[in-house]
Amino acid sequence: MKMDTPLPAVRLMDLHKRYGDFAAVDGVSLDVRKGEFLTFLGSSGSGKTTTLNMIAGFDDPTSGQILLNGGAVTGLPPQKRNIGMVFQRYTLFPHMTVAENVGFPLSVRRLSKDEVNSRVLDALRLVQLDRFAGRRPSQLSGGQQQRVALARALVYEPQLLLMDEPLGALDKKLREEIQIEIRKLHHRLGVTILYVTHDQEEALRMSDRIAVFEHGRIVQVGSGEDLYHCPATAFVAGFIGNSNFLRGSVAERRSDAAIVKLGENSAVCVPVDAVGGVGSEVRIMIRPEEIKLSHALSDAAGAVIPVTVRERIFLGDTISYEVATRDGQSVLVREDRARNQGRCVGPGTDAYMHIAINQNRVYKKY
Amino acid sequence: MILTRNRLGLFRFVLYGHAVLVMAFLLLPIIFIALLSFGSSRWMMFPPPEWTLRWYEELATDPRWAEAMWLSLRLALIVTVLSVLLGGAAAFALVRGRFAGRRVLKAFFVAPMIVPVVIVAIALYAFSLKVGLNGTFAGFVAGHLIIAVPFSVICISNSLRGFDPALEQAAAICGAGRLETLRRVTIPSIAPGLLAAAVFSFLASWDEVVVSIFMASPQLQTLPVRMWTSLRSDLTPVIAAASTLLVLASLILMALLGLSATRAGRSKMQ
Amino acid sequence: MNAAATSGTFREARAAWPAIAFLFVFFALPVGALMLRSVTDPQWGLQNFSDLLATGTYARVLFNTFLVAAVVTLMSLLIGYPLAWLLVMLPARWQQVLLAILLMSMWTSLLARTYAWLVLLQKTGVINRILLSVGVIDAPLPLVNNLTGVVIGMTYIMLPFVVLPLRATLATLDPALMHAGAVCGASPWRLFRSVLLPLSLPGIGAAGLMVFVMSLGYYVTPALLGGTGNMMLAELIAQTVQSFLNWGLGAAAALVLLCATLALYALHMRYLDEDA
Ligand SMILES: Nc1ncnc2c1ncn2[C@@H]1O[C@H](COP(=O)(O)OP(=O)(O)O)[C@@H](O)[C@H]1O
Ligand SMILES: [Mg+2]
């Protein structure tokens, strides 16, 4: 570690959590910068909650270290970690009013009544619920309840805020509304946020950086753009954004490039160091919007693959096609309507698919 | 609805009539006894020739009855506290713990409800004779606690099962320690279950007859034991007065429970 | 400490120890010791059991016990089933009223209720007096100090234990089945016989078994309403121990009662499982 790097807000060092033989978290290492909004993204069961619970102190790691602001917190109970947390379920105390819920962490800290009241009011204003201070949680909607939970997590100004799928139970419209609210709060308060979701769109919308989880490991950490453009594995590529995977096998290796055959009569050129030996399987990932369809061969750089158009769907600003290669692989293509203007590639017709092979998106295995 | 009432034609009036009769069957004896306890006739003439509070007076002033009442009350209160504590802890283990033999343990906790009371009573009687517990206050407490604990375990398990442990995590992350979480979050959340456990434990002890008969000594008798022994000699209206007190206690406590249940139900609805 | 906050570890199990210790010392141990006495008191062997079989009293008491338990079960089912049925059809508010009465009755002092019947059923009691004055009978009926009294009192006490579970069973039956039957043109009576009754049989079985088991071991009501000549098993056990100080014989009778109870209870649980 260089001397001038500030201490990370959270440092996970080779974290493991086993339940019997099963490794729920299997060697996670990560630095979360101060003030950063970092999201754990991964499908259900990939170990996000377990990791978060270990940071919160609800679970002890089987091995590995957790540092908060540079200090090890092993064995420190949750109540001593000064962390805020919002859970997926609305974990408001049902027997307390909204104000009592938000005031709970402050009264636990033995603050004076006046201090508690004024800070509760501030926190409730922050989430625009000051009018509901006297209500019971059961008298609020799901979204309101989750905003109260947010206020409760923020009222004691924790150094770190953990959020485990906080919007999972809300409908789409409300979810987007609160996403924006949380994002704004993050900018305003500068608190470090560790956010968990299995929704890639949510992750892209909110995060400074995203850590993608698979089978208890982090397979890639980076900004949304990094992950979208240079997914480290086929799994990441598949998880973030829409993607097509073309199956092929290595036909020939030269010094500068390798030839990959896609079915009987088409082949593409790929960087040689991205593939294995002759005959080995290859997956090439192509984003739907990076494909151009045309009736004529053009001499643009990249590969050209003959296809048959199966379906054309008009989606307003874009047009989406489903095309099939000669060996029967189905590919999704999306074109801007503006760019598509005039051309008509109808269902049932033959066409050419122009693609640019990006070396970061050629995978040896899925 | 199994079968809509109005589909049943005239037969539904048979059902209505039946229900009215059964309700009368359930209620009338209790009402009858309560009325008789205010009647002046020592031979329990009905309707009573005159109304009087004489039997209650006797109940309060005759030291044998008064002491029995006082003993029953103290006993019921202590048993209630102990039962809720023991049963609450046991319920916590049953609901939260993950260990082999949980089902067996649960069966063990409710076993005193299934084993006939008379067997519990004479088994405990034999045991008490050996260890010198017979005729002592502690012996009564132990005996009643055996009967009361299963109710606590069941009531508190049920409400703990409906309580989301994530609320305890939320309290912990808010900075509350173990005890503060218990006091300010867990216990208030399962309060209806605790109340039910307390009510049923109280009633189980307050009304306990069989174990008490064996545990009692001439000097130490609970109200039901006192009733039992005098019942065997005559039917004096003092017993009716005592019965009315027992019934009244049940009524008040059950009403309390009903009230808390409807309140809990209402706050859930909102 | 940390682990305690997560859901489920061995640590939580420790909270069970006080209750386990208490019930072990004051319940399991004494009951076990008592059962043991059936073969060790006054000396090792099955002498007590052969004594039990040899005495005519015991056989009669056993017969009485099963007879009363059976009659009480039958009566409470006959009275309770129509009530349970009506309960599920009634509007919610009326259901609550009836349920409140049932629950209240169930939790009202057993001794007080038994005493009430003792008074009511006397030769000079209200019931006989009413029957006499209406002219249904010429001489007072012997309603108490015999098995009739026991059956009346026990049925009264067991009724809620039948109605509440039966209502629960009936409430879970799919109404669509009945409607389907009705659409087919079946009369209510046919519907009852060929749809409702068969479907509620498991519930009837479970409730009936429960009441039967409870009746077998009942002490207070039979002892008070049955009089001296009509003992039931629980009273016999108590008397053998308390008055005759014959612990071995009492323990043997207790063992018989316990085994019958546990066996029937196990059957009851099986019924419930199948029902669910
Ligand atoms: N207490 C536990 N005992 C056994 N397995 C568990 C436990 N908690 C979590 N797991 C397992 O660990 C894996 C990761 O779980 P989790 O961290 O909750 O996933 P995520 O939050 O990413 O959906 C899952 O397969 C889950 O079944
Ligand atoms: Mg999760």
Image (cartoon, grey):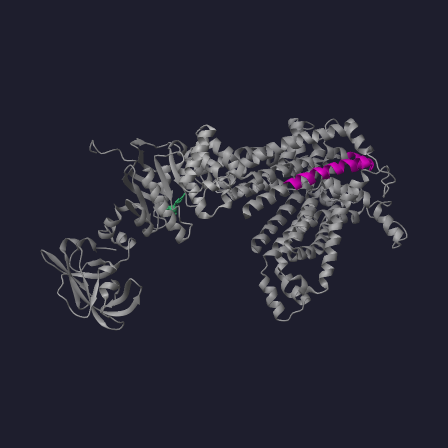
Q: Which of the image's four quarters has the N terminus of chain B? A: bottom right
Residue A243, relative to residue C189: is it above or below?
A: above
Give the magenta part as a residue range: B229-256
Please name the residue shown 84% across and 46% down the image: C126
Residue B53 is left or right of residue A94, and the answer is right
Q: Please say whether residue B254 is one of the residues in the magenta stretch.
A: yes
Q: Residue furthest left?
A: A255
Residue C225, relative to residue B55: is it above or below?
A: below
Please name the residue shown 87% across and 45% down the image: C124
Q: Please say whether residue A113 is one of the residues in the magenta stretch.
A: no
Please name the residue shown 63% across and 51% down the image: C165
Q: Across the whole image, how many numbered discs are drawn on residues?
A: 0
- Residue B16 is situated, as x and y percent measured from the top left of the image, at 72, 57
The reply to whether residue B89 is in sight is yes
Give the camera-side residue of A270 and A206: A206
Residue A339 is left or right of residue A86, and the answer is left
Please name the residue shown 69% across and 64% down the image: B8
User: Quadrant of the rendered structure where residue C229 is?
Assistant: top right
- Residue B94 is situated, as x and y percent measured from the top left of the image, at 51, 40
- Residue B156 is situated, as x and y percent measured from the top left of the image, at 56, 40
Give the camera-side residue of A155 and C231: A155
